[in-house]
Each structure stands twice: as structure tokens, then as C-alpha cells.
Image: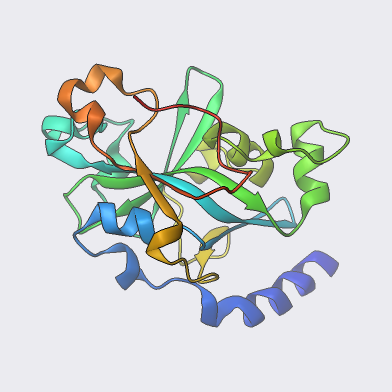
Amino acid sequence: MRNCGQFWVLTMAKLSRKLPLSFYRRPDVVQIAKELLGKKLVSFVDGQLTSGLIVETEAYAGSTDRASHGYGGRRTARNEMLYQAGGVAYVYLCYGIHHLFNVVTNEAGIPHAVLIRAIQPEEGIEYMLRRAGKQQLDYSLTAGPGALSRALGIHYRQHNGVKLTGNLIWIEDALSVPDTEVVATTRVGVAYAQEDAWLPYRFYLRDNPWVSKAKGL
């Protein structure tokens, strides 16, 4: 009952800061990827609240984007959540190891999504360290999409399709980030996407040490 009570207090305090569905259901996935920088990604998993500021994102523009799981209108059991209305999580397993957390955007039937690539830890750091098997805090805890999912307790089996307006995983308004502090560059690991691999769809906060070390093209 203690954890339930704590969660109720936290939920009431945070409710007004939770991003509404209207934020996610806009048509410009690239703009949403930029605007997610400085927002706070929060999880309440196994009775533990953990969070971090989003410092790195990648946009994936659906059927016209060769790097997207929805390119060409491809629709499978694995990527079905991409086709839901914006405001749900698309979590998939990469290389059989990494659970990658994506924010679905736009209207139903349009497979747009933003991959969250890195966060700056804020709340529940002790729980993040425990999940990662770490004794002390360092940048590798959440600097990378697989690492941040592990730290926040996000798993593709439990959290694929979770509503981001619910009480398991959500995103809060937090910092206002000026355009001068946003770096745009190419995405990571999408060389197969031909000319679309060169699209400047990856965004990160300038000089933030929690940004992943991976390089685009």
C-alpha cells in the first residue's frame, strides 16, 4: 500500500505536466522529435518511479522513410503499434538484446515515430543503477536507447502499446529548449536506408554529456 500511496501523490502532482494527446497527434514528426528535447520521460515500473530529461531523439517518417519500420506501408505483427494514433509507445527488441522505446505520433494509419536515444537521469537513480547492475552513476547508464530502457525498466513485452497518457510510462513538460541549443545531424545505424540515411533527423542537446556516443553518417 505504501507504493500505491506514493504513486497517487506523485500522479496528482504531475498530472498537469503530462503531455496531452494533441502533442503527439500533430503531422510533423521531425518537429515533434525536436520538441521532445528537454521533456521528462517517466516510468512507474515494479512500484518504482524513475525519470530523466530527454536529451537525444531520432525522427522516423513512416512510409516515405527508408529507415522506418513502416517504409512502403509495411505492416506486420511486430510494427502494428506504429499504425496506432499518436500517444502510445512502440517498443521493440533490437538484436535480441536492446529494448528500444519509441513515441508514436500523427493520426492512426500513419506510421510516424520518434526514437528516444538518451536521457539525463533525474528521479529514482538508485533504482536505475540496480536495474543496470551498476554500483555508481556514469554516463553509460542512460546514454543510448537500449541503456535508457533498461534503466527505466521498459520492456517490449510489457510496454509495447502502452498509452503515454496513462500511469506506467509518460512524458512531462519540463525544460524550454531554445533552437540554438539543438544540434541536428544524421541518424545512427541506418546506412541501409540509402539516401534517407543522410536525412538530418537526429536531434540532441548541445554539449550535454548524457548524449550517446554513437555517430551518424
Q: Is residue 209 visible?
A: yes
Q: Position of residue 136 (x, y in %)?
A: 86, 38
Looking at the rendering, which quadrant does residue 142 occupy? top right
Q: Position of residue 111 (x, y in %)?
A: 22, 44
Up the image or down, 191 lies above or below 69; here it is above
Looking at the rendering, which quadrant does residue 65 occupy? top left
Left or right of 203: which side holds 145? Answer: right
Left or right of 133: which side holds 31? Answer: left
Left or right of 193: which side holds 204? Answer: right
Q: Position of residue 114 (x, y in %)?
A: 36, 47
Front-lying residue, 8 or 117: 117
Left or right of 48: which side holds 174? Answer: left
Q: Is residue 1 visible?
A: no
Q: Which residue lies at the image location 32% right of the left edge and 63% below the top edge?
A: 24
Q: Which residue lies at the image location 53% right of the left edge and 32% below the top edge?
A: 99
Q: Position of residue 14 (x, y in %)?
A: 61, 77
Q: Which residue lies at the image location 30% right of the left edge and 35% below the top edge?
A: 79
